[in-house]
Image (cartoon, helix red, strand yellow):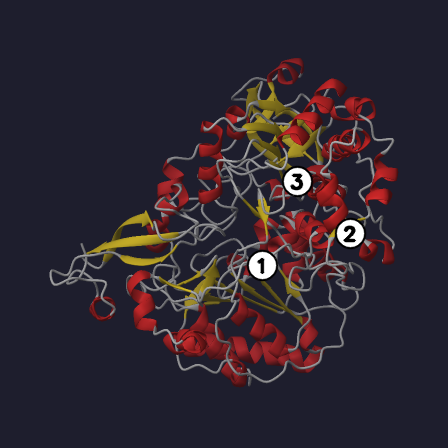
Amino acid sequence: MVGNFVPFQVAQAAREAGLLDAENSGYIPSMCEMCVWRCGLLAKVKNGRVVKLEGNPEHPHSNGKLCPRGQSGLMNTYDPDRVLTPLIRVGQRGEGKFRKASWTEALDLTASKMLEIKKNYGAEAMIFSSTHNLSQPLFENLLYAFGSPNYGTQRSLCFNAMIVSNLMTYGMEEPDRIYDDKLKYVLLTGRNLFEAISTSETSALSHAIDRGVKVVYLDPRFTKTAAKAAEWLPIKPGMDLAFHLALLNVILSEGLYNHDFVTRYTIGLDQLQKEVDHYTPAWAAPLTGIPAETITRIAREFAAAAPNALAHNGWRTSNFVNSFHTQRAIAILNALVGNWNVVMTAAAGEGSGPLGTLKQPPYPRVSALRLDGVPWKYPLVPLTIGVFQELRDNIVKGDPYQPHGWFISRQNPAMSLPDRGKTFQALEKMDFIVTVDILMNDTAWFSDVVLPEASYLERYDPLTIVGERAYLRQPVIEPLGEGRSALWIYKQLGERLGLGDYFQYKDEEDYLRQQLAPLGVSLEDVKKKGYFDLPKTEAAGFSWHTPSGKIELFSNTLAKVGFPGVPVWEAPPTPGENEFYLLTGKVAQQSQFGTQNNQYLHKYSDEPRLWMNAKTAAKLGMNSGDWVEITSKVGKAHSILLATEAIRPDCVYLTPGYGHLSKGLKTAYGIGVSDSVLHVTYTDPISGSQALSQTFVTVKKA
């Protein structure tokens, strides 16, 4: 029930938008931001506070449901550790001493420092980094208008291998997947969908399993997804590539592929067939730990289920330096069985589509090299994705030049980048660091200025298109304290930097109205439902945005820059004596590094422990509950041990996102250990993806 319980400004806007009836009851629609899936939500408000969040049945990502993180999102707003005023550092960096400041003082200081760095060292000496979010166009406006080429995103730490592979194969970042009643067979390679929840896709897979769809799951750990699968294959880490090359070998050598589809819609079959001819199941068996007859059987089952068979190409594909070839093999496997427009189709994900764009001048020309090596070292990595860990490394080295400032928004590189010690070295090299966030995260703790953003329940963000609708994030309550939207922050800062022409809107609602202008839709109408239907367009036929216009089994783009045009075997490094693969992976209760301070999620999350195979632990004289010391080439950490049969003997596992250093995170501080302390930096030369599972550790009783 909302209405007279809601702050006056929000209640008035909600009433004018038709969200409240005569009795002032109803729900306000908006969008979640507890992870990148961004489900639609309905917020129930009482006495000026959000009291319940529910999934919006009109949004395809939620379908009326929210995951545990989405349900806990109101604590994102009401976290007692929220930063509610701008802060300016007064102590030593990392000491945690700040004073409150006005927005005018904080923005003036930030702009003056950025302009000082630009004057003394050039615009390229200012780094900008952010996690993917709806206000990204405004963030990019700021960095491109400022004239810096240096743009750091999280994607190289997550799914660069998948993205670049799909671009080389299909000409798109990620095809959509269809889990309808025709689906018969799903092959999951490390995609732990029942813990790394993407609400709609997780739900769709669950219903598919109920209908009898066979799921084969490859993972060195027995996860919740493994428990739901028909078959779990505890593959040796880094050998996914060998497994999928062997699948291609069987399907091609036995002629099990869709001849008509491959002939009409693909190029490069001959080159592919020649390469995979010697990657037999017998060759792959000792590498993967999976019997040759099992590999052969799965290849035949998958082909027999075609075109209603799906090889899921995963999401967090930053595993080994050979992961790009693994992703190419998976993409090609789907093409061979002709499942396009059956269980895969052109991406209908988020975008701007026919929405209006704001007037602005062209960006200044930039001649400086990017610090992350794109494109001069990584020619295939999109500029808007980059290679974040390489950027950090080159800050430390000062090569090809030394940066002096860092603008960070909705990101926590102190936690997310591998080799945390090196990240602190990079932060120490900065003359000035400014962070935009709602909490004093670990990176904000080392910043000079902290700008408090309004939470996702308190602000507008740009409209986004999902499928055939445009969806709105709108405030359901007034911002607590002095939190402000990114739309407001970037505009205010842009004007102080002399870049006002790149932010030609009066306020947040004016920005949204300019987005809606070409479609003749009013913002007031959109507020009522939280979305509007886009004009109908004719369904497109088969379309791939590759140079050939076809699915490229052989990529000439790869060949032109000196990389194999088809997936080839590259043996990954393996642990030495008494060493283990260090695995990471998601859990359903947390998102990356940003939710561990949420008191609701904390209540239902056990303190993470180091998984180790029970037999291995016994041989080393260790038991569950023991404190152990974990050591890699770059760091050392301590954790409680969990001895379990649910992991291979050559592996150990840590849940990421713990071990926060910021004392401003009173709930998360001191809980668990950070895997970033241990991870060694390895980068795939093709996609720029960080090879997180290529770190090897020793373990002993502490």
Task: Check disc 2 and give the amino acid type.
Answer: Ile
In-front residue for pair 22/105: 22
Q: Residues within 10 Å of mark 2 (few under 14, many from 20)?
A: many
Q: Which mark is residue 638?
A: none
Q: Secondary structure at mark 3?
A: loop
User: Badge 3, how many Cα within 10 Å: few under 14, some, many 20+?
Assistant: many
What is the C-alpha distance between the residues marked 1 and 2? 31 Å
Residue under pointer 3: 678
Q: Earlier in the sequence, mark 1 or mark 2?
A: 1
Residue drawn where x is 11% and y is 60% of the image: 23
Residue 195 visible here: yes
Q: Residue at x 70, y 78 (%)?
A: 122
Query: Which marked residue is nearer to the observer: mark 3 or mark 2?
Result: 2
Q: Which mark is residue 686?
A: 2
Residue for badge 1: 540
- Compared to residue 193, the image places residue 621 above or below, namely above
**Disc 2 element:** loop
